[in-house]
Amino acid sequence: MIEIRNWHSMPTEEVMKILETSPQGLTKEEVSRRQQIYGPNKIEEVKKLSTLRLFLRQFQNALNYILFIAIIISLIGAHIIDAMVILIIIFINTSLGFVQEYRSEKALEALKQLSAPKASVIRDGKERKINTEELVPGDIVILTTGDIVPADMRLLTAVRLRAEQAMLTGEPGSEEKHTEPLPEDTPLVDRRNIAYSGTTITGGRGTGIVVAIGMDTEMGKIAREISEAGEEKTPLQKRISRLAIQLSILAAILSSGLGLLAFLKGIPTYDSLMFALAAAVSSIPEGLILVITLALVVGIRTMAKRNAIIRKLQAVETLGSATVICTDKTGTLTKNEMTARALYLNGELIEITGEGYTPIGDFRKDGAIVNPKEHSHLQLFLRAMALCNDAHIVQEDGRYSIFGDPTEGALVVAAAKGGIDKEKEEKETPRVAEVPFEPERACMTTVHQFADGKRHIYVK
């Protein structure tokens, strides 16, 4: 593994030299070699329980412990049928919990494969999208507004780059980033030339070189401490534990009192003891744990019909107490694809046909097809959409996708439907200056050099 270094205090050239990489990125062969050395870029999860341990965990319930005591008492009193009935109740209860949690674990594993996060990298001199787990130290990553930083990285370029890192530092608001070296004793929260894993890019764009992945990142260190803290009981589990203690105390007091009363009435000692044990068993509500489990299972089934997966039975009650739920939408609840459906220009609404990122479609006004090449204002509008844009159309195995922000990708695809080739336009009118999109300005500006010596400004 790479020895921990003060990357923030080094010039970018020295960082690249140490990590043996270049602005063109790593080669395919070098990436494969480093993946063998460093492993996947992911935060280690709590060790998954085996099927047997998952089943045995269902017995870890305070009421179950009381029922086991009731079984022992019943066997001592030769009440075999009572013991068998209680045992069947425990088995049904644990089986219901096991089946539900086992199904949930399998469903969650499938979801993780579907929603693998992506990162934009430069490898072999080309930009490409990869799963974040495939990142290795030395990779060159492209960062744009809205991206979640996939690993700890030393910034190489930063154009008005800002990052929200409150989840890591506790400091509210976004921090402006730069590429200049900092003093070696600079605190973590003030290292403006480092982009930390898990933080969000809120403005501008830039590139960075990966210096730490997985559990070696600052976020990974926090995850390790959290995993070592242990698992806290849910509110329902705490209430069940209190109820079990109260029932145990009540059963002990009542059975002892009845046994003592029987003994004082002249009943033989053995019979008085058996009477007390029988009273203790009868005071325990054997069906309560089963009723609770059935209620939770019904709740889980209801949630499942609404496409929600609950991993643990007890979590249903906790979730039922929640009033606000914050969740990521893009790529999880949606396909992370956008399509431009219409544009409004010069007081006219023009519809755009086509689906997804395939650059095939028509422009229609009042149902009639419009040729953008015959309308100079529409042609200029589409050119601005393509040039004031950082996204690109990518075709692989006959399937079209976009490299970059989905919103910008939708605009590039719409321009392509109108005959605007982004790559050709960028060669003929190269970008010479820019002001990246920022929430404060709510727009992006690019400056392009034309062959006649003039410069045109496009704003989006």
Image: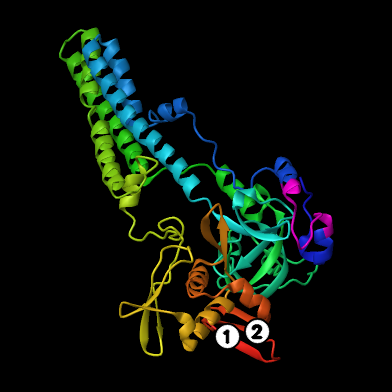
Q: Which label's residue is closer to the chain start, 2 or 1? A: 2
Vertical placement of 39 versus 328: above or below? above
| Residue at 77% in and 48% down | 2
In the image, taking residue 187 as reference, residue 168 lies left or right, namely: left
Labelled disc at residue 448 = 2
- Amino acid on which disc 2 is placed: His
Q: Quadrant of residue 256?
A: top left
What's the magenta region? 17-31
Mark 2 lies on a secondary structure that is: strand
Rendered location of residue 259, percent (x, y): 22, 18
Give the spatial CA distance, label 2 vs label 1: 8 Å
Rendered location of residue 52, percent (x, y): 45, 25
- Amino acid on which disc 1 is placed: Tyr
| Residue at 77% in and 52% down | 4
Q: Quadrant of residue 18?
A: bottom right
Question: Which residue has dot 1 on it?
Answer: 458
